[in-house]
Image (cartoon, rainbow, N blue to C red):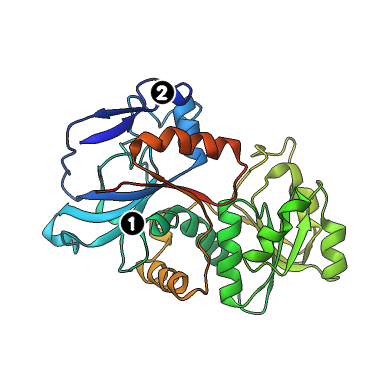
Amino acid sequence: MRAVVVTQPGGLNALQVTTVPMPEPQPGWVRIKVKAFGVNESEVTTRKGESDPEVTYPRIPGIEGVGVVDQADEDSGLRPGQQVATMMGGMGRSFDGSYAQYVTVPASQVIPFETGLPWGVVGALPEMFQTAYGSLATGLALQAGQTLLIRGGTSTVGLSAATIAKDLGATVLSTTRSPDRAGELRAMGVDHPLVDNGTIADQVRELMPNGVDAVLELVGCSVLADTFRTVRRHGTVCFTGALAGQWNIPDFTPFMIPSGVRLTSYAGGATDLPAQVFQQHLQAVAAGRLKAPVAKVYHGLEQVREAQADVEAGTTPGKHVVLLDD
């Protein structure tokens, strides 16, 4: 089969399209014919050699993918030809991932679904929806009628979280560092786009004097103290990402958390996105209730370099998806 292989870390030229042996599924694993996959910052990090020691080389990158079952054990409950998604769980890191015509993964991280949506749309959704849904459901237990602040709102997870929260019935505030991108947030259903210059607490309190019910923190520890100031007493902050690059706070003390404000985190995997929930999201996208923030669809493994370059540039909001045409 054909695949993109990183033999040694490096620049975009490290992404080599080559022929490799067809992967054989070990017991309890499933082989999937890949139809499309999203391109993520994590894979850029893997290509550069900046990942943790879990990542070894040579490696086929790709932490998510969608396609159809090619081979599965009878007791897996999966059948050949069935539409499925998979993500995370070491995929593309400790074992070969989705930048290939076929991928093998544990059956436990395979999510079956049925949809008539184009593969270029479906390919944008698994990791993005899993992280957004997990943060809102597991991290924040967000309810209809509550107010949600998304800090880092023009990221793929931020855009996805906004659509899910609006479909749930929440009021959504979301941030961008660029005033020119406020319209992108409104297009995703955001009620109150906010321009983030490093401090947004005063802006939030002008809109919500008592503070918001919940915050999805995607910018990171560099702004966390200011984020705490936006939350009402007994509200919750869920730390999911660090777009600004700061994952910890030197000399942290719990007393920096305001009295009565809750801090949690989310770093789940495929099992946190139940098949029923993913199916509901697909139906909502098909019905127009949810928007799939797709930045660009690329065709064929030869365009993976271009896709990673565009992800690194960060100039186009939404998910970059590679479609493998038959």
Residue 45 in view, yes or no:
yes
Residue 257 in view, yes or no:
no
Q: In this view, does 138 lie above or below 7?
A: below
Residue at 82%, 55% in the rendered image: 200
Which one is in front, 97 or 74?
97
Q: In this view, does 102 lie above or below 276?
A: above
Question: In the figure, is residue 70 to the left or right of 123?
Answer: left
Question: In the figure, is residue 284 to the left or right of 220?
Answer: left
Residue 288 rendering spot, x and y as whole percentages: 50, 73
Residue at 78%, 58% in the rendered image: 194
Question: Quadrant of the rendered structure where residue 163 is?
Answer: bottom right
Q: In this view, does 51 lie above or below 200?
A: above
Give the mark, 1 or 2, whose residue is nearer the N terminus.
Answer: 2
Residue 159 rendering spot, x and y as whole percentages: 59, 58
Residue 74 rendering spot, x and y as whole percentages: 11, 60
Question: In the figure, is residue 124 to the left or right of 144?
Answer: left
Quadrant of the rendering where the N terminus is positioned: top left
Q: Mark 1 highlights which residue? A: 85
Question: Quadrant of the rendered structure where residue 96 is?
Answer: top left
What is the number of the mark on residue 55? none
Question: In the figure, is residue 291 to the left or right of 64?
Answer: right
Disc 1 crowd, CA 10 A, few/some/many (<14, 14-19, 20+): many
Residue at 15%, 47% in the rendered image: 27
Residue at 79%, 61% in the rendered image: 230
Residue 206 rendering spot, x and y as whole percentages: 88, 67
Which one is in front, 124 or 173?
124
Q: Distance between the residues labelled 1 and 2?
A: 27 Å
Type of the residue with mark 1? Ala
As helix, strand or loop, the secondary structure at mark 2 comes to helix
Q: Mark 2 highlights which residue? A: 14
